[in-house]
Structure formats: structure tokens, C-alpha cells
Image (cartoon, coloured by chain):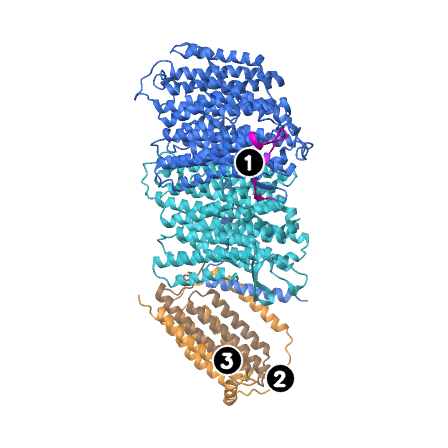
Amino acid sequence: MIENIGIEQFLILSTLMFFIGVYGFLVRKNLITMLMSVELILNAVNINFVAFNKYYYPENLQGHFFAMFVIAIAATEVAVAIAIIISLYRKIRTIDVEQVDEMKY
Amino acid sequence: MMNDSYSYTVAIPLILFFSFLIIGLAGGKLKPIVSGIFGTFFLLISTALSYYTAYSYFFVDGKSNGVYQQLIAYDSLWLQFTDKLQIHVGVLLDPISVMMLVVITTVSLMVHIYSLGYMKGEVGFSRYYSFLSLFTFSMLGLVLSSNIFQTYIFWELVGVSSYLLIGHYYERPSAVAASKKAFIVTRFADMGFLVGILLLSSFTGTFDFLKLTDPNGSALTQGSAISFLGLSVMTWSMLLVFMGAAGKSAMFPLHIWLPDAMEGPTPVSALIHAATMVVAGVYLVARLFTVYFFAAPDALIFIGYVGTFTSLFAAVIACTQTDIKRVLAFSTISQIGLMMGGLGVSGYSGPEGLGYTASMFHLFNHAMFKALLFLCAGSVIHAVHTNELWDMGGLKKHLPVTHIAFLIGCLGISGVPPLSGFFSKDEILTAVFEKNKLLFYVQFLVAGVTAFYMFRLYFGIFWNKQREYHTKPHESPFSMLFALIFLSIASTFVGLIPFSEFVTPDLKPFTSHIHWAIAIPAIIIAVIGLVLAFVMYRKESDLSGRLSGSLGILYRAAYKKFYIDEIYLFITKNVIFKHISAPIAWFDRNVVDNTMNGIAAITNFVSMRIRAFQSGQLQQYAYVMVSGLVIIVLVALYFMKT
Amino acid sequence: MEVVLFYIMAGLILVFSVLTVTSRRILRAAVYLLFVLIAAAGLFFIQQFAFLAAVQLTLYAGGIIVLIIFSVMLTSHVSEKLDAVSFKKASFALVACIAGAVVCISTILSYPFPKPTNGEVDASMKAIGTSLLGYKENGFALPFEVISILLLAAMLGAIIIAKRTEK
Amino acid sequence: MNNLLWLLAIPLVTIFVLIFCNDKRQYRLSAAFGMGLQLLYSFYLVFRYTTERSSGNIEQMVFMHEYKWFDSLNIVFTTGIDAISLALVVLTAVVTFTGILVSWNMEKLPKEFFISLITLATGVFGFFITIDLFTMFLFYELAVIPMYILIGIWGSGKKEYAAMKLTLMLMGASALLLVGILGLYTYSSTDVNLLSFNILDIANANIPVDIQKFFFPMVFIGFGVLGALFPLHTWSPDGHSSAPTAVSMLHAGVLMKMGGYGCLRVAMYLLPEAAKELAWIFIILTTISIVYGAFGAIAQKDLKYINAYSSVSHCGLVLFAILMMNQTALNGSVLQMISHGLMTALFFALIGMIYERTHTRDIRLMGGLMKIMPFLGVCYMIAGFASLGLPGLSGFVAEINVFVGAFMHTDSFHRVATVIAVSSIVITAVYILRVIGALLLGPLDVEHEFETGDARWYERWANIILIVSIAAIGIAPLWLSDALIKSLQPIIQKLQ
């Protein structure tokens, strides 16, 4: 059963996943791949929510619902982000994040 | 002392103020001659009132127990500084102010009438008359002042009317420059006057003439004790007041504006720069004579020396000038110097006050004959259209009336009996002789020089060789001649007035006699001067040229007015403008302003540096955020464990 | 059994996560992400959150990944290889990430977690339904509605942003 | 009718009406009507004020009204006037009205221009009628901000630079000021619940001297920048010369007076002990201001620059007088504010009118204008004479009050400073006569094609109103001076 797995394992897994996502966010130049990294980060968070719900608060479903809402928000975020990326692509024919630096000064 | 029976005197100046307003505001719409007649008419009323005042003051009720009273005929509070220190505007009647009333209104009336002819057809005729009214108003206000600040107020107003009238021909750059110079030089002197008033009032606590000049009052004793740089504060303040007086009265070294002021119309020179405004300084010293005598005797002596020096200095210059109005201007400076000299040596009570009396007497006479001389000069200029002495000559046939009038004026100023100048000059010389021998000899010399340069003028204009004129010279119209005749008669007979019966420093009349021991040498030296001029200038000869050539450098220096103008020009142009003003303007633009701009530039620079953080690189932001977060967490975990 | 499954899932997640962020072919990266998401759904299954796992599979693995793939296809060629990451950038990011991970993991390991309560989770459809629409204690009606408005707004926003502007 | 909010309501309604106007005639008529009404109302207030005083009301401020605004911080918008603020309100009304007359033919965006101008005026009116530091500060800002727009859009020359500089310097000053005001607020009472922004309340609080010495320079400099205190005056030449005519008038005529008024009402009145101790520093600065501005004016060639430097000198005199801290000098400073407001407004109005006809402001390129525009020439001369302190015009009354007051101090420091300040009357005469000579007199420069035509009716009226006010104060100063002295008593008592 699940008792054999400590919560630490879940947490370490999600931590690693989180920082892999962060690494991706920091180094990938393509906006879409950055978006994917964000998805990784969100998922890492989801794993945490669910694990805490399971281990310490089994009587209600808060973590579970939070994870669900995160998924919903991730969906909206992706929708909007992709809309932005596409319109950006139309304007400047690239989705390289380093070229998108109009918003400075 | 209040006296209601004289309260109408306040109307004497005010009528002219209204005249100024009416002519000034409606001037453009009136026919020129109408404004002229308006102005003259208003002045006639004032003159009549003044004569009536003089009559009733001197002969009816001015005296009480044999002493002339100082009457406050009108008084109103104008401005209040503190409960004690107030500026009143009022009318003070005493012998000198009543005398001045007569002088001013008479000369002004003559000038008004004269100008109807002289200025006929000139542009700005209405303007001219409105300014004449303004000037007469201010001058009357000045002499009637009951308060030293009121004097200052009108002092400035006469200054500005003088400015406006000198600059009457404002399209002539020389007139503009002259008016500017006159105003600024007198303004500079007025600064001294103002500081003097401030100093005086801060020690005596009053501006009021009656309180200031009361010989038994407390005002005189205050401030005498405190000394500053070796002189008492009272002396300092009275010297500063004298600075103002010297500016107005063109005493050396503040005389430079007066010769230039001759750029104005000639009647204006007669009124302002000969008869009335320029003697305001003398009047002021006379007005404060008690203060000078009791609280600042050193200042009084100083005035005597300055006056006497100026009179010699100006007389010497007058001998070399060729512009007839300038000769008269220097002669005016010289005569005012004599008056100042007379005041400087005067005592206070009884016959000792002869200097004071003589000085006022001379002021009175001088106003008449100098106005006469200027108006004659105006008449000559009117006829030949030039100011240059050597462009004239042989005019006695063409201008008979002017010729006689000018002769009377010259005799008057030279002190030939029985014309007016003789009596007053004799009294001044007597007073000086008793007090200070050095000053006496100088003034004695001046008397001779005066006769010389006046007759140089006379012979140069009316005798000498007939010149070529563009148009045949003709005698002036009646209005001008009327003024000349009137003033000739006045100059002839005013000398017979027993002045010491009326005007004395302590207000108590005394009787004076002619001191023949001094009078006869004075007449002799005047005649010597006259004869010298006769010899040199009656006919065209090279005598004068030879003489001036032999005097060489001295002559050139005098001709150049001893380079005083150049010194002033150097100071104003090179020192003040180039080395103070322009550097300040530069300093302001480049140092002060650039400091401000520099602060802005530094801010700008710093923000340009800071903005590099805002690169627009999303990943850079994220990187900073992540690493920052890690560091914060690290710090929070391992260093802030408490 | 669960332990084995967990480690398999965890291994998949880590491997494919790393591949997602390092692959130079963008389409492949999307596919790797898909595997990660599926593996995460597996983890939810292990913890008996069947509904959540289903949502994860349909929404994430189904919807979002498809969306991403579409956008990849719209903006780049399938065969296009991304530029290699510069060494400097990668190393800096790596340092920050490893440092972060170390901090977090060491904290996790040093923290004395209490013993799990080991209760049974009632994640049946009924329980989820009542909680989601409940407005009393443990009810999530309000966030549910908020999310629905958010979704609507995002939909509108996405349409407006992506709409071709006429020139 | 004696509710002072009318002074704010009239301009606001005017602005509101202006929004709905739609041609040039309507703009200027409604603006002139509104500000004319304001002028009449301010005269009515004078009348009410004198009747109120003669009926024995000896309150420091009359027509007080309170409007709770922000209860928890005890911010109460309190209005009230005494003779000082009333005089400045009338000044503002006069200058605003004439400013609108002068802008009668404004071509560029007239609607926006009038709206901004009236907004600015509203700020100034508010500033003078409030006796609450917080709202005072608010109105100060309200007056400064439209300035930026007005200079930036309708200005000439380096307008963007000038507008930026002016606004930044005044904003910087207001930052200092805000600190000062908050400081005063914090020490206005020992009880935290009774802290107040009300000037009358703060005046009763005993603020420790050390604290006063900390805040006094902030408040004084904060207001002093607006009053062109050396060396923080540099915004003034650039600002004045770039601003459009009406704005220069309002700015030099009224806005700079806010500086003097603030120094008097806030710095001196509320921080008297510090004022006494620190005055010497500022006396030195203002003395420099006076002479320096005057000398600076001599060397200028642009009419507006000359006048701007002359303003530095004259406003220096205002602050100088305030620092002399006795009745006569303070009275002189208020008179100088009014007098300078009127005459500098007249100057700028005339410069604008002359510029319209000659298209240059360089005095070297002009000459003999008296011949072709006698009315404007005469007005310019009168303005000049007022500026150099000719008796019979307002400048003289103000200056002698200042000098006599300053000279009442018996120590040599004050006396030397006074004598230096007095010397400015000569320097002033020099630059004024220089301008008059170069501009109006002399031969007419025929090389330049000047548009002929003397003043039009609205220009005539603007000038006449200002000249009559100047002459009225100059000829009969007693009524004004007496009223001011009575209102100055509370301040003087604090300073003794």
C-alpha cells in the first residue's frame, strides 16, 4: 500500500520536477517550450497538493480541488498564452523570447 | 501749528495735478493750443493763489511776536509704519516755502506763456504741457512738504517729470541718453537720500519737519552721541541727505547730468534745470538747516566746501563751452554752488544767519535772471536754429528785445548794481568772508569768471561778426517776448527786496546792509571780467584762440569738462556693465542654472544605468527572481534562525 | 506494488521532464511533456484520486498538449531544430536550480513530518459532486463559479488577442 | 454669499460651461464672463470684509467654514480670510481677468487653453482661502500642474525644456514642503487624536525649538523656490520667457506670490523661534537675490528675460521683508507682493502685445515704438515707473515699507543688508530706463516691418484695469496698509 512510500518521496519528486521546469523556463528561448516548462511547474505543484491531501487531510478534498482548479487555470493560461504567441508571431515572425524585448525602459 | 485759514493752499499743487490728468488723458483729442491754454490757465489760478498766500503770510498774519510762524496748513495721514513713524502729506508754510511758491509759480507761468510761442507746431505739444503741469505740481508739492518723506516722494516725482521733459524729443538718441543719464544719476543720489532718511528717522523717530527742526526738540540730540567711523550718526545721515541734494542740485561730482539735460526743450531748461528743480537741493539743505547746524556742523562745513569748489569748477568749464545752453547750464551749477557755499557758512541766529538769508535770496534772484537768460537763449535758438555760439553773431539788430533782456540777465548774474544779482552775491560774499577766508577768495574769483563767461556769451551772440543764416533771423512772437519782458523787469527790481526781513534761519527778521568794503571789490572784479570779454569777443579776433592755445592742456581739460563724463562712462560701461552685470548674467546661465541642470543630468544618468535592469528579457527577470528567491530562503533558513 | 509503481512513475516523470526541457526538437518536447503528464496522472491513480487522474489525462494530456502541438505547427516547421542553449546561460540557470533544489530537498529531509493519518479518502464521484457544488463547509461552489468566469474571460481574451487585426 | 467656496465654485462652473462651448466667441465670452464675475465677487468680499471688521469682528480669520474631509486623520477643509489673503485673492482675480482679456485672440486650442488657465486660477484661489495645510498643499499642486501643460503646449521657444524645468523644480520644492507640513502636523498636538492641519490650531501648539529648526528650512525653501529664492530661481527666467502671455502674467503675478504668502503664513507664523534663529541665512540669500536679479536684468536682451530677472529681484524683496519680522517690513512684503503682482502682470501683458506686433522680443531689434503704438508705450512706461518705485505708484509704497521696516533693526548686519537692498532701486532704474530707451524711444527702426496698430479694445481694458489698481495703491495706500497691519498682528506677536 501507499503507506510504504513516505511523503518525502512525493515532495522530493515534485521539487525536482519543479526545478527542472524552472531550468527549462530559464534556458529555453522558444516561447512554446517555455510554456511547456510552466506546465511542468504547475504539475509539480499539483503533485504536492494531492500528496498532502492524501497523507494528512484524507477526510476532505481540498488538495484535490486545488489541483483541479490549477488544471483549469493552466488550461486558460495556455489558451491565452498561445493566443498571445500566435499574434506575436504574426507581428514579428518569431517567437524567440530574446527578440521579444519591446517592453523595456 | 495747525492753521485753517491757509487750508486753501493745498489747492495750489492739486489744481496742477488735475491739469496734468486732464491734459494727459484727453491730450490726444484736444487741439494742441487748447491744451496749452488749459495748462496756462490752471497755472494762473495757482499763481494767483500763491501770490495771495505770500501776501497774507508775509504782510498780514505770518508773524507772531515778531517771529515768523511755521504753519501746518493742511495735514493728512498718508501711510503708517508704526504708531509713531508715519508719513503725512501736508502743507507747511514758512518763509522759505512761501518764497519758493512764488518763485515756482512765477517762473512756471512765464515758461508756460513762453512755450505757447516757442513750442508752437511741435509734435507732442499737449504732452509737453501735461508734463509741465506734472512738474509744477511735483515741485510745489516738494516745497510745501511738511514731512521729509513727502519731500522724498515729490523729489522722485520732479525727477521723473524732468526725465520725461528732457526726453521730450524722444526720437533723438541724444535726448534719450541725456534723460536716462539725468534720471539715473539723480536716482543714485536719491539712494543716499533715502538711506539718510532711514538713518535719520531711526534715530529721531520722526519724519516730521517741525519735530526734526525744532531747535529745542529732542530729535536733534538723539543720534549725535552714537558715532560711526569717527563721525556721529547724525552727521552721516545728514551727509547722505546732502548726497540726494547734491544729485538734484548738480554738485560736483554728481553734476554730469545737468549739461546733458540741455537736450530738452529750452523752456524746460529754464524752468527745471535753472530756476526750480535744481535748486531743490539747496532748498532741502535750507529746510533741514537747523538739523545741520545743531546736530551735524561737520556736514554743514562739508557742504560749504563742496558748493564753493563746484562753483569754481563749473565756472571754469563754462568759459570753454561753445554750446550756449551748456554754458548756461554750467553757470547754473556754478551759481547753485555759491548758494550751497552760502548755506555752508551760515550761522543760526540774528545777523549770523546772513549766509542762509543770502543763499535764499540768491536762489530767488537766480531763478529770475537764469530763467530769463535761458528764455533769451531759447529765443535766439528759435531765431537761428542752432545752439553753437560760433554759428551766431551780430544778432543785436535782428533781435532787439531779446538783446536787451539778455543784457539785463548778464548784468544781473555778474553782480552789477543795481540789478538783483549784486545784492544777493554781496550778501553771500560777506557771510563767507566772516566765516572762512579761503572760501571767500574762491568765490570772489568765481564772481569775476562769471562775468567773463556771461559776457563772452553776450558778445558772441549779439555783437561779433554777422554770420550767414539760412533764414533771416526774426524777433520771437509776442508770447515769448512777454515772458522775457516780465522776467527782465523782475530781475531788475527783485534785488531791492529786503530779504533779511523775511527769510532767516531762526525765523526772526533782522536788517542787513550792503557791505561796501566787499561789494566794491566784487563790482571791480566783475567789471574786469566784463571788459576782458569785451576785448576778446566783441569783434572776431584770434585773441581768444591764442589765449586758449597758450593755456594748452588746461584749456583742453576744461573743454572736455575735466573728463568727468568719461570717468563715469568708464565706470558704468566697463565696470558695472561689463564686469558686474554681464558676468552675473553669465554666472546665472552657466553656473547656477547648470547646477540645476547638472542635478537633472545626474538623475538622468543614474536612471539610465538603472534601466539596464529592465532589459525586457523575460528570462533574465525570471532568473533574477528565482535566484533572489533562493537566496532569500537561504538567508531566512540559515541566518535568521532565532 | 504501489512502491514499485511509484518509482516507475517517478522515474518516468524525471526522465521525460529533463527531456522536455532539453530536447532541441520542439515537437518531441511536446510529446515528452505528454509522457510526464500521463505519469503524473498515474501518481494520482496510486493515491486513489481517480477523478483527478481522469481530468489530468483528458484536460492536460488531451487538451493542452494538443493545443501546444497546434501552436507549434503554426509557428514552426516540424523538422526545425532549436538552437543549442548557450553554455553560460545553461550553467547559470543550472546553478540556480540546483541550489534551489538542494535547499528545498534538505529542508524536506530535515523536517520531521508527523505520521500520516492514513484515513481513507472518499474521492467518489458523489463526494466530489457535492463538495464542488456545496456552499457550506468544504463546499467549493464559489471558486467553481469564479473559475468558470475565468474560463469565459480567457476564451474571449484568447479570441480577441489572436484575431487578425485588419489593417 | 460670504461663503468662500464661491471663489472655487465660480471658476469650476466656468470650466464646466467651457466644456460645452463650441466656438471661439463662446469660449472667450464665457471665460471672461466667469472671471469677471469672480472679480466682482472678490470686490464684494472686500466690501463684506470691511463691514465685518468695522462691525467689531476681531477674529483672526473671518468667514470661516469647515468641511470635514478625512475624519480619521482630522483633515478638515477650512476656509477663512484675513486682509492678507483677501488682498491676494483680489489680486488673483484681477490678474486672471486681465489674463483672459489679453488672450482674447488665442488661436491655438482656445478651449483647452482657457480651461487650463482657469484651473490654474482655481488652484490659486483655493490656496489663498484655505487655512488648512493639507488642502493648501493640494491647491498648490493644482496650480502648478496646469502650468506644465500651459507652457508645454502654448509656449514658445524652448518650451518643453522650460516647462519640464519649472515643473520639476516646483515639484522638488513641494516635496520638501510636504515633509515640512507633515512635520508640523505631527507636532501640532501632544495628543495623537488631536493632531491637526489647521494653521490656527498649529499656531497654538508649542513646537520645540529643535524641531522647529529642523522643519523651518524645509518649509521656507519649499515656498521660497516658488518665490524665486536665490539660487533656486533659475526656473523663473526660462519659465517666464517660454510661457504664453497670460500664463506669464498669472505665473509671475500670482503664482510667485504663493511662495511669499506661504513663507509668511506657514514658515514664519508657525515656526517663529526657528525663524528668528535661522533668518540670517535667508537674509543673506534674499539680499543676494535682490541685487543679483537686478544686475542680471541689466545684461539681458530679451524683454521677457529682463522682466523675469526683475521679478527675481522684486520677489527677493518680498522674502527679504518677511525675514525682517517686524510690522512695517511684513506689511511691506505683502504690499510688495500685490504691487509686484500687478505691475509684472502689466509688464508681461505689454510684452505679449508688443511681441504680437513686432514678432521679436530682442530689444536690440526694436526702437521708437512710442511713435507707432503710443498707448502701449505709455503703459509700458508706467509699468516701468511702478517697477523702479516711483511715488504715486504701488511699487514705491511697498519698497519704502520694506526699507523702513528693515532699517528698524539696529544691528549692523541688518542695516548693511538693507543698504545693499536699497541700492537695488538704482540698478532697477538702470535696467528699466535702458529698456524704455531701447524699446520705445529713439528713432523708429525702419528696417523691420512692424505691424502697426495700437492696442485693441480688450488690450486697452486689460492695461487700464491694471494701471488703475497700481495707481490706486500708490496714491492712497493707507486703507490697504492699515487693513494689512491689523491682520498681521497675530504673526507679529508670534515673532516677538
Q: Position of residue C66 (x, y in %)?
A: 39, 77
Which chain does the blue colour mark? Answer: B
Would you name the residue on which mark 3 appears?
C143
Which label number is shown at residue C117? Answer: 2
Give the answer, above or below, for where A14 lies relative to D102: below
Give the answer, above or below, for where C109 lies relative to D244: below
Q: Which residues are magenta?
A: B58-81
Q: Colour of chain C?
A: orange
Front-lying residue, D72 or C52: D72
Which chain does the cyan colour mark? Answer: D
Amino acid type of the residue tagged 3 in the rendering: Pro
Q: Compute the Cα span from label 1 to label 3.
A: 93 Å
Q: Quadrant of the N terminus of chain A?
A: bottom right
Which label number is shown at residue B145? Answer: 1
Amino acid type of the residue tagged 1 in the rendering: Ser
Q: Position of residue C84 (x, y in %)?
A: 43, 63
Secondary structure at badge 2 equals loop
Do marks 2 and 1 both belong to one polypeptide chain?
no
Which residue in the rendered view is the most extreme toward the right?
A: B225
Which chain does the brown colour mark? Answer: A
Q: Compute the Cα span from label 2 to label 1.
A: 110 Å
Secondary structure at badge 3 equals helix
Amino acid type of the residue tagged 2 in the rendering: Thr
Corner quadrant of residue B244? top right
Which of discs 1 and 3 lies nearer the camera? The answer is 1
Q: Position of residue B416 (x, y in %)?
A: 49, 15
Q: Compute the Cα span from label 2 to label 3.
A: 27 Å
Give the answer, above or below, for where B622 lies relative to D124: below
Which of discs 2 and 1 lies nearer the camera? The answer is 1
The residue under the point 55% across, 36% down is: B145
